[in-house]
Structure formats: C-alpha cells, structure tokens
Image (tube, grey):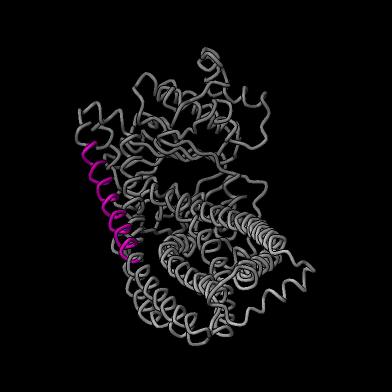
Amino acid sequence: MSLYLRIFRYFKQFLWQTLFSLFLMSLGVALNLLKPWPFKYIVDGILPSTFVAGNTSQLFVARWLGWTSPAGQILFLSGALVIITLLASCVTLLSNILLIRIGLKGTLKLRADLYACLQSLPLKYHDARRSSDSSYRVAYDSQSIQTMYNKGFSTIFTEAITLVAAFTLMIRMDWKLTLVSFVVLPVVMFGIRFYSEKIRKASTSIQERESDLLATTQEGLSSVRMIRAFGRESFEIGQFLRAATQSLEANFKMNVTSTQSALVVGTLMALGTSLMYAMGAFQVLHGTLTLGDLLVFASYLTMLYTPIEQLIYTAWALEGATVGAQRCFEVLDEREETEEHPNATTLEKVMGEITFSNVSFSYNPAKAILKKINLIIPPGETVAFVGSTGTGKSTLLSLIPRFYDPCEGVVRIDGYDLRDLTKASLRAQIGMVFQETVLFSSTIKENIAYGREGATDAEIIEAARRAQAYDFIMAMPHGFDAPVGERGGHLSVGQRQRIGIARAFLKNAPILLLDEPTSALDPATEKEIMETIFELMKGRTTLIVTHRIATVHRLKHIVVLQNGAIAQQGSGEELLADEGVYARLHQAM
C-alpha cells in the first residue's frame, strides 16, 4: 500500500472538515488575487502619469462609485484593500486552525496505534531493539504525518490553486510577459530534483543520529549509580559528546543543503523577475501596457513564484517527513508473533492443570532452547524447575502466558490448547513474580493496584498485609501514598519484591509463575520472602524457576532441565539419592 494512502487512512474520518477547510482556502486565494486591483485603479485611473495607455480606469471607477473626487476614490480603494486583506487573513486563519487540529488528531491516532502495536509485539522484537529507538518513533517520528498533512497536503492545495489562477490571469493580461517569466522554470525543476535526494538522505541521517543521542542519554542517566561506582563519568560524557556531535554534524549538513538550495532557487526566481520587469518597462515606455497593469502583473508574478518556491520547500519538507512516516509504519508492519485466533475461546473458570506435550522451542532455528518437553502438572501442584544457566527454564515459563508459542508441540491448560484461547482471558488466570519487580513512578498503592483493575483500598491493604509489606509501607512518611521513585529507587530490593508479591496476592489467579523470585536477595531476606511466597502458593498451580536448590529442595516435584530437555524429575530427596545432575547442582551450592 502506498505510503500516502496509508497516511490518508488516518485522516479519512475528518473528510468533511478537510473539504470545508479546502473551500476556505480557495476563498482565501480568490481574495488574495483581488489585492493588486485597488492599487491598479489608483495608479491608472486617478494618479497623473505620463505613460498611461487609454486611462479608462478613472471613468470606470467614477461611474461605479458615483464619485468625482480623486481623494474620495483613493480613500475608498485604500479601504477596500484593507477589507480584502482582513477577509483573506480571517479565512486563512480559520482554515489553518481547522487543518492544524485535524493534523494533531491524526498524529494522536498514529501515536496510539504505535504504542499499542509495540505493546503487542513479541518480546523478541523488543530484545533486538533499543527501547529509546521505539520511544523516538512514538514521540517524534509520529509527528511526520502532521507535517505531511498540514505542510504537505494543505500547502500543495493552496499553492497549486494560487499558481493556476495567477498563471491564467497573467496569460490573459500579457502572454509574452508570462512566457518570459517562465524561462527559468526548467532550471528550477532541475534544481528541485537535484536537491530532493540530498535532503532525503540528510533527513534520514538526522533522525538516526537523534535516536542514537536519545539512547545514549537514557542509558547514561538510568545507570548513573553504576557510572559513579566505577568512576566512569568522563567516559560517559565523552560517549554523549560523540553522539551529540554526530547529531550536530547531521543537522549542519541538512541546513547547509537547505541554504544552498534556497540560494539557487532564489537567484533563479530573481532572474525571472528581472526579465519580466525589463520587458514590461519597455512595453510601458511604448504605451502598450499601463503602469498599473505592470504593477498588477508584478504582483501576480510574485504570487506565481511564491507558490513555486513554497512547493519546492514543501517537497523538501516532505522528504524529511516521509522518512519519519516510514519509520512509524515499519513498526506497524511488524506482525505479532503469538497471533490470536479469530474464534478464540474465552477462558473462564480454571482448575489449573498444565500439560506440555512434545514441546520444542527455539529463538534461532540453528539452536533449540527446549526439546520434546512432556510434562503434566495437576491442579494445585507446585513444580520447581532447576538447571544451569541457559537450559530453557525461563523460556518454558514464558510459553504459559503465550509470550511465545512453541515451535512444535502443544501447551494446554485444563485441556485447552493455549493457541485457541484469547490472550486476555488466559493471562487473567496467571499471576507472576519475577526476579526484578518492575515498579512505575507512582505511589505504592497504585503499584500494588496494578495487579487488578478496580481493586478497592481495603483489598490493596489486605494484599499488602499478606505480602508482609504493610508494616514497612506504614512506616514511610505518606504510607500507601508514598512515591516509589523511578523504577522503585526509593525502596530496597526486598521491599520492591514484596510489592510484586502483593500484586500477585491482589490478582488472586489460580496459576502462579515465579521466575527467580529471590536470586537478587541476601539469604536472610530470601528466607523471609520465601515464607511469604509459600503462603502465596497455597491452593494454586505454581511453577517456580530458580538457581538456588536449597530454596526448593523440600518440594515434592522438581524438574531438572539439561540442554533444553528434562533430565530428571522427582522430590528433592529422590533426586539427591539418584546422584545425577541435581546432586551435582546441590553439591555445588
């Protein structure tokens, strides 16, 4: 689909408003075309002149106004010019306001689509790209369609009408002068084509460098503690300066190109104007053209050249905007990896049985992460997955909420193939606690309430009590309304983890996934957190991934993964007695 057609889809709902704006633009153009005529009548019909051919305007104006006084006619015509200018300005203002509002609404819709698309794209997409680049596309590249609509569509329409109308009037007034004025246009068109490609390349470079600069800034500021701990402030400042310098150079190159193009176009336009003035002056001297007609013709030539110049600059602006729009549509063209079936079933009451049948998965076809996993987890049972790094433990958990779909085999809940369920209803039945609890820059209450939309204050407080977070929350200056800071920076690691557990309590889902929930904690804090987690696990089907064997050794069902396959399974004591992989892991603690 054409890029411009895709952009049009964001504005088609505003078709009638756009058409009304175009009508206003046309009216504004017509009023602007009337501006030179009051002065023509003053020059040719009222003011004394040596070079007047016929001097008929005075008779026309006097007959039309019923005035014989030159002063009265001059005042009337001067007033008419003011009224025409005011009406043209008001009409243009109104049309611009309408078009700007429509352009902003289109930008809002594109931003919403981009953000929603990024939320639905697979984790693999986000792992392969910097978050700052995605942020730049949402915040800045999305503005390109407003540029293309307001500076592109509206400018092209207005200037095209002005161009055609001015050309028609000029031909009717003096076709020879018109042809002389158009002598420079072929060279102008060549200049447009020459500079357009250079400006497109420069625009692409600017947006890439600006995206890199944003990434460097975000990474440096988000890692400020580590930077200071290692004394790397000078290095990071140097990194920032390099990125900022590259951005500066790209902007400088773009501005130099634009300045050069403006110089060339301006010179060519001046050449065309000078040729017209020279030929027009000779005609006035020979009495074949009035001075007023020459002034009107000069005004129309300005109206002719100005649209051409505006169209040139608009074309170059569109080159830059096109790059941004393409970067936006690159995201929208990405397909969601775990697509939802059109007739997907809504998962309602869940018992919690989870079945893996011949499940295999790989991020890269050359290397399998999971191989032929067969496992049945009865409702309410707790299963721990252990193994060395890279054996596929976390990946196995990611298949259950359909962050990924298996390359082979089937994952089922209560007999339902996960691919036949709506993702919203599936994930509503799953609670999760991760190694690092992600907190938003808001209050403690809002972060706990993230576990379930519409939760009451009483339910939030009860969840905090069950997560053993209530006491430290109430000890803070503002209690549940205390801000947590960016990424929970005002809280300790253990406190952040309890907030995450409180979310899971609040959600009260029948299936619980725990991915390294205590690996970042010291032994004393880990013991306290695990007591809370064991309370959370009661009555739920729970899958826990951990490197710490002691944390799960007392469980009845432990699955040992090795090279992406199930090597052993059983209770901790059974596996220890088997003297296999588990025993070696236990011994290495």
Is 239 in the magenta? yes
Residue 217: x and y in percent read: 33, 40
Q: Nearer the viewer, residue 258 or 263?
A: 263
Horizontally, is 165 left or right of 487 in the view? Answer: right
Horizontally, is 174 left or right of 218 in the view? Answer: right
Q: Nearer the viewer, residue 362 or 64?
A: 64
Residue depicted at x 64% and y 71%: 41
Horizontally, is 406 left or right of 231 in the view? Answer: right
Horizontally, is 403 left or right of 563 in the view? Answer: right
Q: Quadrant of the C terminus?
A: top left
Residue 436 to residue 13: above or below: above
Residue 177 to residue 205: above or below: below
Residue depicted at x 59% and y 77%: 165
Residue 478: x and y in percent read: 56, 16
Residue at the farthest bottom position = 176
Is the magenta region chiefly helix, strand or loop? helix
Is 86 in the magenta? no
Q: Is residue 463 visible?
A: yes
Q: Nearer the viewer, residue 4 or 397?
A: 4
Residue 446: x and y in percent read: 58, 30
Residue at the farthest right position = 66
Residue 331: x and y in percent read: 45, 60
Q: Nearer the viewer, residue 433 or 288?
A: 288
Q: Which residues are magenta?
A: 236-261
Residue depicted at x 53% and y 70%: 299
Q: Choose top left, top right, bottom left or bottom right for residue 162.
A: bottom right
Q: Choose top left, top right, bottom left or bottom right for residue 164.
A: bottom right
Residue depicted at x 56% and y 37%: 540
